[in-house]
């Protein structure tokens, strides 16, 4: 494994507002690097493994030529939590003191529901199928179950479709409480596209499969895992150190890449 080269680091200076659309109650914050971020909290939902999935799938998206917001590691102090008036938010902030995930806020972006091509504010048109097919391939590869018509997790910004919110991907790591499980099981697991917002583009996915597989390999996965902060890589039996946990993720992703069982319309 390479020496870890984790995400850029910034410190939260102000909690602005909660985003109540999500069940994990992410929020908008400002940081000392002058950035504005959507913060995903380590104390929410299923904990830091959701943050790990966000980093991994975002890294995969970039390598597949998809637009996705820049990520940073955000340090949240107890002082920020102390002065939050909303009791629910204060509890979440207090449970998340320390290292959290920041996702670059995209001002002026708007949601894309996979329908007809749309024009962004600068007049550029998006929604012709190539990007959607790449998104479908990514979601199938990572077993993402959270890109439905009810919650597309797609934005249009500066003439491009941006993929966001990948915490529901890579479900296999939630079974690691008793130890690292078998990568072959994840490799062979089919992916259900019935509820996917971009399902009408499924016929294009097999045509781009070889191209996208060629962009990924075990070394690429290792590079992506090196971005994940040590603090988010919880030890499990059989993978007690952060580097061992990284290696486990690489093994699962490599096994998945070697299979076609999950490929919509292209399994052999």
Image (tube, rainbow, N blue to C red):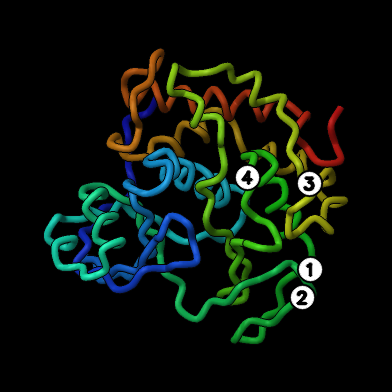
Residue 182, given in percent of the width and then of the height, sits at 58, 16
The local secondary structure at tag 4 comes to loop
> Which tag, 1 or 2, sits closer to the chain's start?
2
Disc 2 and disc 3 in contact, CB within 8 angstroms: no
Q: CA distance from mark 1 to mark 2?
A: 6 Å
Q: CA distance from mark 4 to mark 2?
A: 24 Å
Q: Residue at the location (58% across, 59% down)?
A: 163
Look at discs 2 and 3 and give the one toward the viewer: 2
- Identify residue for label 3: 208
Q: CA distance from mark 3 to mark 4?
A: 19 Å
| Residue 257 position by quadrant | top right
Disc 1 and disc 2 in contact, CB within 8 angstroms: yes
On-image quarter of the C terminus: top right
Q: CA distance from mark 3 to mark 1?
A: 15 Å
- Identify residue for label 1: 128
Pick the front one: 168 or 87: 87
Residue 220, given in percent of the width and then of the height, sits at 52, 35
Look at discs 3 and 4 and give the one toward the viewer: 4
In the displayed orientation, state which residue is furthest to the top: 238
In the displayed orientation, state which residue is furthest to the front: 87
| Side (left or right) of 66 relative to 131 | left
- Identify residue for label 4: 144
- Identify residue for label 2: 117
The local secondary structure at tag 2 comes to loop
Q: Residue at the location (67% across, 25% down)?
A: 187
| Side (left or right) of 220 relative to 112 | left
């Amino acid at each position: 494994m390479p020496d870890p080269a984790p995400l850029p680091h910034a410190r939260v200076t102000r909690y602005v507002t909660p985003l109540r659309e999500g069940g994990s109650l992410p929020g908008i914050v400002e940081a000392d690097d002058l950035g504005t971020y959507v913060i995903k909290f380590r104390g929410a939902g299923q904990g830091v493994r959701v943050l790990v999935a966000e980093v991994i799938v975002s890294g995969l998206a970039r390598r597949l030529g998809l637009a996705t917001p820049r990520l940073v590691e955000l340090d949240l102090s107890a002082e920020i939590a102390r002065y939050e008036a909303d009791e629910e938010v204060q509890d979440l902030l207090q449970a998340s003191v320390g290292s959290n995930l920041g996702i670059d806020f995209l001002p002026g972006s708007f949601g894309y529901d996979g329908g007809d091509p749309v024009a962004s504010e600068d007049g550029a048109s998006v929604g012709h199928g190539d990007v959607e097919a790449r998104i479908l391939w990514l979601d199938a590869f990572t077993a993402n179950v959270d890109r439905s018509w009810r919650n597309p997790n797609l934005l249009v910004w500066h003439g491009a479709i941006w993929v966001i919110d990948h915490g529901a991907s890579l479900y296999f790591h939630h079974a690691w409480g008793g130890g690292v499980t078998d990568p072959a099981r994840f490799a062979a697991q089919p992916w259900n596209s019935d509820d996917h917002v971009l399902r009408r583009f499924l016929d294009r996915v097999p045509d781009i499969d070889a191209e996208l597989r060629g962009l990924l390999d075990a070394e690429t996965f290792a590079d992506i895992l090196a971005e994940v902060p040590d603090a988010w890589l919880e030890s499990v039996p059989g993978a007690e150190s952060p580097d061992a946990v990284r290696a486990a993720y690489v093994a699962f992703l490599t096994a998945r890449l070697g299979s076609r069982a999950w490929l919509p319309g292209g399994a052999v």
